[in-house]
Image (spheres, rainbow, N blue to C red):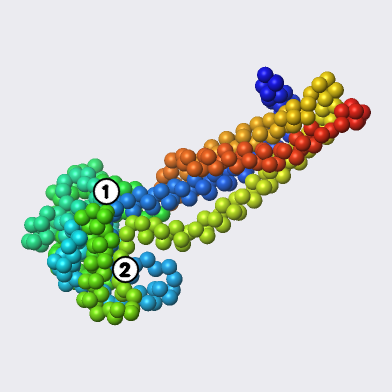
């Protein structure tokens, strides 16, 4: 009952000083909003990246010539590497016991036409029929390539959702034709829409049989990589080791030299992205934390003013039996109520701002438990840290001096 009464007194004091309360709220709102915006936006972007990488599956990895480049020096060294060869694919299929499926993948950029409409800079991928078993490609309509399509070099195409929406708006694209560089392809399937990310459109692609890609664009060299699926997660490392031995031997890499190719998994790609962006993310959060400190100082200053103005009130309450802890709790309740209220408002505004910012790069986010917890923790902590000194000062006032204060 005492605690409830103290809380009611604190609410009454805040309501009686609306301007002061509003200024305190504003300081906290600005601080929590900035933190919430940064955390929500970063969480949303990293979640989108993880979602894209999850399509690889836990037992899948990619062999590339260049790998993940993080510096100019790495780029110069990687450019000296020999391209991957088609012969390496056959050798991996024969000699890698831990590999369940192996698929070459090549890509080029070209213009795609359908009737009088055309799309420029479409990613034209070439892969064998088993790519859909290695990568989590969901088919929305029709089908993916078959072994016969690869074997007989049939000019068929599996297209992204953007191709359907732009070139065949309101129509069923299955069975219709597109032209790529003068060659005619029959659409046999449409992929499920993935949605844009970082301004790129992952639905703007056409995948044709690998044999047809080689026929039209030539044997891929610098643009080819090899996708491999191990039998299970337990055999993933074994599959990578076997492939490393096969490729080092085939490419005549000396025993004391590093690999002249890269093996990428979803985990090490994400780890590289995290290491690149870690300093940037910490810097953003650090800069936005300054606003929390400023908001806390605002809370402390206004609470100090409140204590000074209400000195006689504190003296009267002490004279009629209020203890130190009661006075301290009253002012702490005032600080916490203000900062928590500002925190809740800041969480909502911060999420909306983060959604707007992330929407500019064609991504969507949902409320993050981490961001909400961080916002509430920060607002509560601000109230406790910056409200404790004014509350203690009020509790320590001598009642006789307080009653005589003018």
Which residue is at a point 20% across and 64% down the rendered structure image?
A: 104
Where's residue 398, x and y in %?
A: 87, 31
- Above or below, 83 against 184 in this view is below
Q: What element carries label 1?
A: helix
Residue at 90% x, 28% y: name it.
Answer: 400
Along the viewing direction, whichever of 348 and 171 lies nearer the viewer: 348
Q: Which of 222 and 278 is in front in this view?
A: 278
Q: In which quarter of the image is residue 110?
A: bottom left
Residue at 62%, 38% in the rendered image: 380
Q: Is residue 246 above or below residue 9?
A: below
**For mark 2, what is the residue?**
262
Residue 117 in sight in this render: no
Image quadrant in which you'd find residue 332: top right
Q: Where 204 falls versus 72 (above or below)?
A: above
Q: Earlier in the sequence, mark 2 or mark 1?
A: 1
**Marks 2 and 1, Cα distance to the nearest angstrom?**
31 Å
Q: Nearer the viewer, residue 342 or 61?
A: 61
Label 2: how many Cα within 10 Å (few below 14, some 14–19, many 20+): some
Asked if 398 appears above or below 236 in the picture, the reply is: above
Res 252 seen here: yes
Query: Mark 1 — residue?
Result: 161
At horizontal 17% and vertical 51% (from top left) the residue drawn is: 144
Left or right relative to 301: residue 283 = left
Location of the N terminus (image quadrant) = top right
Q: Closer to the camera: disc 2 or disc 1?
A: 2
Quadrant housing residue 393: top right
> Residue 188, image x and y in percent?
15, 50
């Amino acid at each position: 009952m005492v605690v409830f009464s103290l809380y009611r007194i604190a609410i009454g004091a805040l309501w009686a000083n609306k301007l002061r309360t509003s200024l305190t709220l504003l300081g906290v709102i600005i601080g929590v909003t900035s933190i919430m915006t940064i955390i929500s936006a970063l969480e949303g972007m990293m979640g989108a990246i993880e979602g894209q990488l999850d399509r690889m599956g836990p037992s899948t990895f990619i062999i590339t010539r260049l790998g993940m480049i993080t510096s100019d020096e790495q780029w110069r060294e990687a450019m000296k590497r020999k391209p991957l060869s088609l012969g390496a694919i056959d050798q991996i299929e024969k000699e890698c016991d831990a590999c369940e499926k192996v698929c070459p993948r090549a890509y080029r950029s070209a213009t795609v036409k359908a009737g009088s409409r055309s799309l420029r800079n479409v990613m034209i991928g070439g892969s064998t029929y088993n790519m859909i078993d290695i990568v989590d490609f969901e088919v929305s309509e029709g089908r993916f390539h078959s072994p016969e399509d690869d074997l007989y070099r049939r000019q068929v195409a599996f297209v992204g959702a953007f191709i359907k929406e732009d070139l065949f708006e309101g129509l069923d694209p299955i069975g219709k034709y597109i032209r790529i560089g003068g060659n005619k392809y029959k659409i046999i399937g449409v992929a499920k829409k993935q949605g844009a990310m970082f301004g790129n459109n992952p639905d703007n692609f056409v995948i044709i049989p690998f044999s047809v890609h080689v026929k039209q664009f030539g044997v891929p060299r610098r643009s080819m990589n090899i996708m491999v699926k191990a039998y299970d997660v337990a055999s993933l490392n074994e599959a990578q080791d076997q492939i490393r031995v096969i490729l080092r031997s085939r490419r005549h890499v000396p025993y004391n030299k590093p690999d002249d190719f890269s093996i990428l998994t979803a985990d090490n790609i994400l780890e590289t992205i995290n290491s690149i962006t870690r300093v940037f993310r910490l810097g953003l959060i650090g800069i936005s934390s300054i606003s929390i400190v400023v908001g806390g100082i605002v809370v402390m200053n206004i609470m100090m003013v409140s204590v000074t103005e209400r000195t006689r009130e504190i003296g009267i309450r002490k004279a009629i039996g209020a203890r130190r802890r009661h006075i301290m709790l009253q002012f702490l309740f005032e600080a916490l109520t203000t900062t928590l209220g500002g925190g809740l408002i800041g969480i909502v505004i911060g999420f909306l701002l983060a959604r707007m910012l992330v929407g500019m790069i064609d991504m969507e986010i949902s409320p993050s438990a981490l961001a909400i917890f961080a916002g509430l923790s920060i607002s509560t902590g601000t109230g406790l840290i910056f409200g404790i000194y004014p509350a203690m000062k009020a509790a320590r006032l001598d009642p006789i001096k307080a009653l005589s204060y003018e």
